[in-house]
Structure formats: C-alpha cells, structure tokens
Image (cartoon, rainbow, N blue to C red):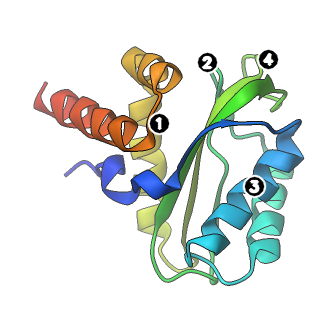
C-alpha cells in the first residue's frame, strides 16, 4: 500500500511565502517549525541531523523542490513540514536550479522502513507536475492541504 503524504501534513505545518535567504536558514526554519509543534524536543539536534544529511548529498531533487529529511531519536512520530519560500534559494539541487518548495520530513530514528516509505511518497508526489502548480498557486494553507490530499487520492486511483 502506498503511503499518503497528506496524512502527515497538517495545515499548521504548511508555511507560505517564507522569506529565507539560503539553505542553512531553510534547515533552521524547518527544525524550529518541528520543535514549535512538539514533533521534536531539540531543534538544534534536528538541524544538525538535516545539515549532516545535506553534506552527504543534497536533497534538492530538481524542479525547484528540496526534501530535507532526518531520522531522529527526538521524535516518536513521523511528520512533514511544507514551506513555500518567498524567493528561491540555492540548494545544490541535482538540476542546478534553486529551490522554492521545501517538503521536510522527520521520522523516529528506529523507523527505517517508515523513513523510506515517506521519502518514496514525497518523491512520488513531487514527480506529479500538478504538485508544483498547486503549491505555487496556493493562497491558504488549509486549502493547499486539501488540494494535496485530492491530488494524492486521484493519483492512487490511476
């Protein structure tokens, strides 16, 4: 069964038109967003885990999308944060293009299968050309969450 990303993406974890200047600021923002929602206790530990992951290989997957992620003992549940940046930032993406959409995820450290399933779900969602259009056109976090749900449900019916 395919993992549905919308089930882990609450409207309060969708941030639109966030003014950040670089990849490092994006990673800090995401780590602090997870901490502010109680997903992780220590934003610094999550930031460092994501930064270490980025140093191994960029999570800029192309088409203006970045998917920073980390397994962390700081969390007991998988979670997602979506950030649409006000201005695209360099993310060392595989296609060399800057990133404007960030779908960040964190999973419990011991949940390797969940981590891989979530990454696969995020990748599947990001490969849908309608996803970028929906995110870029969104003016409301709740409506965007519902549009992503509809997109995923329609895609799994094919």
Near mark 2 (Cα within 10 A), the count class, few <14, some 14-19 or many ≥20, is some
Is 109 left or right of 24, judged from the image as shown?
left
Where is residue 87 drawn, in percent x and y? Answer: 77, 24
* Labels 3 and 2: the sequence-earlier one: 3
Q: Label 4, label 3: how many angstroms apart (C-alpha)?
A: 22 Å
Residue 63 marker: 2
Camera sees residue 53: no
- Using the image, tell me which numbered label, if any, was put on residue 96: 4
Nearer to us of marks 3 and 2 is: 3
Report helix, strand or loop for mark 3. Answer: helix
* Left or right position of 50 against 143: right
Q: Residue at x 40, y 56 (%)?
A: 10
Q: Position of residue 79 (x, y in %)?
A: 48, 64
Which residue is labeled 3 in the image?
A: 29
Cα separation, mark 2 vs mark 1, equals 12 Å
Q: Is residue 134 above or below residue 118?
A: above
Circle 4 or circle 3, nearest the eye: 3
Work out whether residue 4 or residue 143 is closer to the camera in this orientation and state it: 143
Counting residues from the start of the chain, the first of labels 1 and 4 encountered is 4
Q: Which residue is mark 1?
A: 123
């Amino acid at each position: 069964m395919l993992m549905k990303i919308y089930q882990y993406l609450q409207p309060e974890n969708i941030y639109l038109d966030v003014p950040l200047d670089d990849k490092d600021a994006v990673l800090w923002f995401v780590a602090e967003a997870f901490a502010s929602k109680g997903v992780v206790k220590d934003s610094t530990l999550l930031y460092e885990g994501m930064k270490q992951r980025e140093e191994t290989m960029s999570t800029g997957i192309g088409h203006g999308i970045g998917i920073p992620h980390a397994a962390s003992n700081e969390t007991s549940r998988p979670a997602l944060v979506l950030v649409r940046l006000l201005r695209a930032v360099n993310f060392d993406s595989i296609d060399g293009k800057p990133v404007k959409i960030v779908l960040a995820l964190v999973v419990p450290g011991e949940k390797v299968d969940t981590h891989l399933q979530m990454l696969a779900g995020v990748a599947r969602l990001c490969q849908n050309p309608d996803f970028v259009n929906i995110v870029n056109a969104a003016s409301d976090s709740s409506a965007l969450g519902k549009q992503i749900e509809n997109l995923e449900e329609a895609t799994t019916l094919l």
